[in-house]
Amino acid sequence: MTMFKFIAAAGVLATGLTITGTALAQDKIYTIGVSVPTADHGWTGGVDFFAQQAVDRLSKTYPNLKFVLQTAPDSTKQAADLEDMVTTRNIDALVILPGDPDAMTASIKKVKDAGKWVTVVDRQLSQSGIEDLYVAGDNPGLGAVTADYFKANLKPGSKIVVLRGLPIPIDKQRFDAFMAGIDGSGIEVLDNQFANWNRDDGYKVMQDFLTKYDHIDAVWCQDDDILVGVLKALKEAGRQDEMWAVGGAGMNQIIKMVEAGSTQVPVDVSYNPAMVGLAIETTALKYVAGLQINGQYIVDSTLITQGNAKDFDYAGTPF
Amino acid sequence: MTMFKFIAAAGVLATGLTITGTALAQDKIYTIGVSVPTADHGWTGGVDFFAQQAVDRLSKTYPNLKFVLQTAPDSTKQAADLEDMVTTRNIDALVILPGDPDAMTASIKKVKDAGKWVTVVDRQLSQSGIEDLYVAGDNPGLGAVTADYFKANLKPGSKIVVLRGLPIPIDKQRFDAFMAGIDGSGIEVLDNQFANWNRDDGYKVMQDFLTKYDHIDAVWCQDDDILVGVLKALKEAGRQDEMWAVGGAGMNQIIKMVEAGSTQVPVDVSYNPAMVGLAIETTALKYVAGLQINGQYIVDSTLITQGNAKDFDYAGTPF
């Protein structure tokens, strides 16, 4: 049992004797491959940051854990990375956030068929039963938690606009849960349009809404990247005091606004890119603690207020 | 950020310099209270074992983590333990497997209301929204995975008996999923009776079934404690070659039978008491890795065969 050997080695630490990395490294070495998309927008920038953090922390805490961390701009590169991890780097486990889960399903299945542990993060594969562990955020929860905030802070008859992501299941889960959550509240949704989870589209869609509607009480834009575009449009139109706006994810510049008590952006709702770090840390527990870890770990979408914003204000994050 | 301070301290380890527990202990100290039932049957014996393992491993790995581990034979003692942890021991977080979740809900809510982190293991409280993290096994999955095995290994027309647990939701989730799983397979369930998740009742119920039914192809008894009683009844009746039997949980004596290739107990299905260790380890990640961990972590019910039994054969476990 690796678990017991490791306890014995770590015991030296607790009693305060001299130890060296070499002494601990005599335990069996395990190699974990980590494959994440190259940052294509703010959130994936956070993913890359937290993946690197987890790899650094675990490498230093457990000298018998080795990591191969690769970022990929597309599925061709991500598939090639996986093949290299299996054939050349001889990984024991893979932790992957697939850039395009449909395109990556076959490649991930090959890793599993080669007898490797597979942890999938965030995006469901197009075939079920491949991964051992699935770590993700709560997309319906993001819509429901946001709806609760809107209901509690808007009177019946209030008018809102919604900027959605892309027409894929994650967006639909968030949107449907939000609409179900405000049902019966008397809040009127003037319009909803896709803003593709990016700033430029958020800016353009919000400009359009501002042209079409002469009074708006609040904006739900589902994502902090979109929110940055929305805030720019509001400022340019001089309508920033007319309405408040809520995004989602936990971008640092938005967290800092919430933390400072912004009335324009009073809250955020987490969809934390740090979930990739949690996936790597949890996978490591299989090797350092000998625990059964297969299953589903769904991280809550948490309402981030001025009171708890400091818990989401990560130093050094690029997102 | 605690995370970064810890990486810096741990970095000393990786470079092989002399360090002592004192050096690491200069980091902020966090205290985690762990409250589990005193072993009243085999499975809770496993819970106590794996809770102690996790506490030992984490204490030795992270000198800035302190633990208060208490076992309680009843809700009165468990509630008193919680009050002591909050008022006297000043815990930062609680990890609790409530012996009686209904009776413990108010006490656990008090811990939450005192501003402490709360991780609940296995048993759902009677009020939702109290705990920050819920770690549990997959009860419907236990029934479904077992049903798949029965379908794959019994011909249409085969006759089976079912020994259930107690008439509580966990039992119903397991039983309903099993029945849905074998639906349409032609397997006939001769009878099902409660055996209260213990050996003596398993023995008595199985004796009754053996008297009533002159041919049985297989037994599903949902739990390895019941299975031990079933095996005793089969042996005494000299009918141990007539049928095979499947329990659940992962008791070591059953795992060893599966590992040895038993035809009478060909497989087991995990409902791993080590989930309490996973709950403690995951809670610790909040403090040692600075990660957002709130949510739901449901550990799979895994089919344990001769091929993977060694992964569930924990050295030194009393269960």
Image (cartoon, coloured by chain):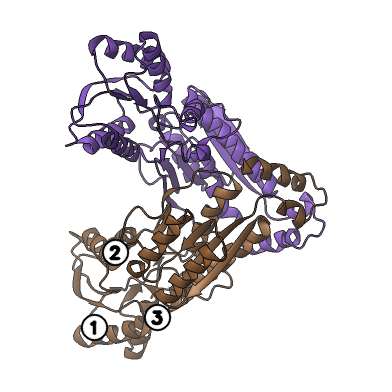
Chain colours: A purple, B brown
Where residue B174 is drawn, which disc sits there?
Answer: 2
**For the residues carrying marks 3 and 2, which lies nearer the camera in this image?**
2
Cα separation between marks 3 and 2: 19 Å
Q: Residue at x 58, y 40 (%)?
A: A33
10 Å neighbourhood of mark 3: few (<14), some, or many (≥20)? many
Position of residue B192 relative to residue A218, above or below, is below
SS at mark 3 in the image: helix
Asked if the residue at tag 1 contacts the one at tag 3, i.e. Cβ–Cβ closer than 8 Å, the answer is no
10 Å neighbourhood of mark 2: few (<14), some, or many (≥20)? many
**Residue A16: quadrant of the picture:** bottom right
* Residue B314 seen in the figure: no
Q: Position of residue B56 (x, y in %)?
A: 62, 64
Direction from residue A67 to residue A238 in the image, left or right: left
- Residue type for callout 2: Arg
Do the residues at discs 2 and 1 belong to one chain? Answer: yes
Q: Position of residue A18 (x, y in %)?
A: 82, 56
Position of residue B253 relative to residue B153, above or below, is below
Q: Position of residue A45 (x, y in %)?
A: 53, 27
Viewer-side residue, B193 vs A159: A159
- Residue type for callout 1: Phe
Query: Which residue is tagged 1?
Result: B209
Among numbered discs 3 and 1, the one appearing first in the sequence: 1
Query: Which residue is tagged 3?
Result: B228
Chain under numbered label 3: B
